[in-house]
Image (cartoon, helix red, strand yellow):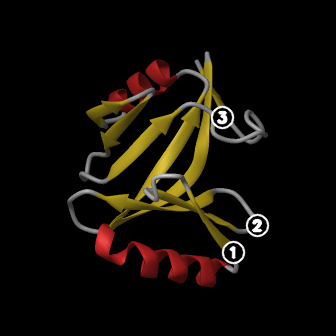
């Protein structure tokens, strides 16, 4: 048995558009932006869940991706594969996956202090 829920929406953007995209989403959501030490991830703090972050891409086109947080990454990845998702790459403790249409999303360990509130329990 494990639990999971949607936790974040990632706005993946080429490096040259990162600052403008961050400013746009902070303004659009009425939030403030705070970057990590490397400047790769910029969280946009605004009220509500899921959270939004802007991620600087090394390569690739701009896109939106979802993060699913879970207390059992392996079980959640297996559950999503059974639904038609495929693994793309393991990065540290999380998996980048594709849905059946090719959209990227990530399966991550709990990222929020209120986990497991609002989760679904899976057998």
Please report the residue visible at 23 percent of the width from the left and 67 percent of the height from the top.
Answer: 61
The Cα–Cα distance between marks 2 and 3, rounded to whole angstroms, is: 22 Å
Position of residue 89 measured from the top left corner of the image (x, y, whole percent) = 27, 34
Compared to residue 27, the image places residue 18 above or below, namely: above
Structural crowding at the residue carrying mark 1, measured as other residues with C-alpha within 10 Å and reported as few (<14), some (14–19) or many (≥20): some
Q: Specify the quadrant of the image occupied by residue 1.
A: top right
Q: Specify the quadrant of the image occupied by residue 44.
A: bottom right
Task: Single out the mark in the foreground, 2 or 3.
Answer: 2
Please report the residue visible at 78 percent of the width from the left and 40 percent of the height from the top.
Answer: 114
Label 2 belongs to which residue? 47
Compared to residue 93, the image places residue 14 above or below, namely: below
Badge 2 or badge 1: first in the primary sequence: 1
The Cα–Cα distance between marks 2 and 1, rounded to whole angstroms, is: 8 Å
Please report the residue visible at 30 percent of the width from the left and 54 percent of the height from the top.
Answer: 103
Taking depth in this image into account, of 64 and 2 the one nearest to the observer is 64
In this figure, what is the number of numbered marks? Answer: 3
Label 3 belongs to which residue? 120
Label 1: element kind? loop
Contact, CB < 8 Å: mark 2 with mark 1? no
Badge 3 or badge 1: first in the primary sequence: 1
Structural crowding at the residue carrying mark 3, measured as other residues with C-alpha within 10 Å and reported as few (<14), some (14–19) or many (≥20): few
Residue 52 image label: none
Residue 31 image label: 1
Contact, CB < 8 Å: mark 2 with mark 3? no
């Amino acid at each position: 048995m494990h639990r999971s829920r949607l936790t974040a929406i990632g706005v993946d953007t080429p490096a040259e558009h990162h600052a403008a995209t961050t400013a746009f989403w902070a303004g659009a959501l009425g939030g403030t932006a705070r970057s990590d030490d490397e400047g790769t991830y910029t969280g946009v703090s605004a009220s509500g869940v899921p959270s939004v972050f802007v991620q600087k891409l090394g390569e690739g086109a701009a896109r939106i991706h979802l993060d699913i947080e879970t207390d059992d990454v392996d079980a959640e990845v297996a559950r999503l594969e059974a639904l038609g998702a495929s693994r793309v790459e393991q990065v540290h403790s999380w998996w980048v996956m594709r849905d059946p249409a090719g959209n990227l999303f990530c399966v991550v360990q709990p990222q929020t202090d209120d986990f497991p509130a609002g989760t679904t329990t899976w057998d």
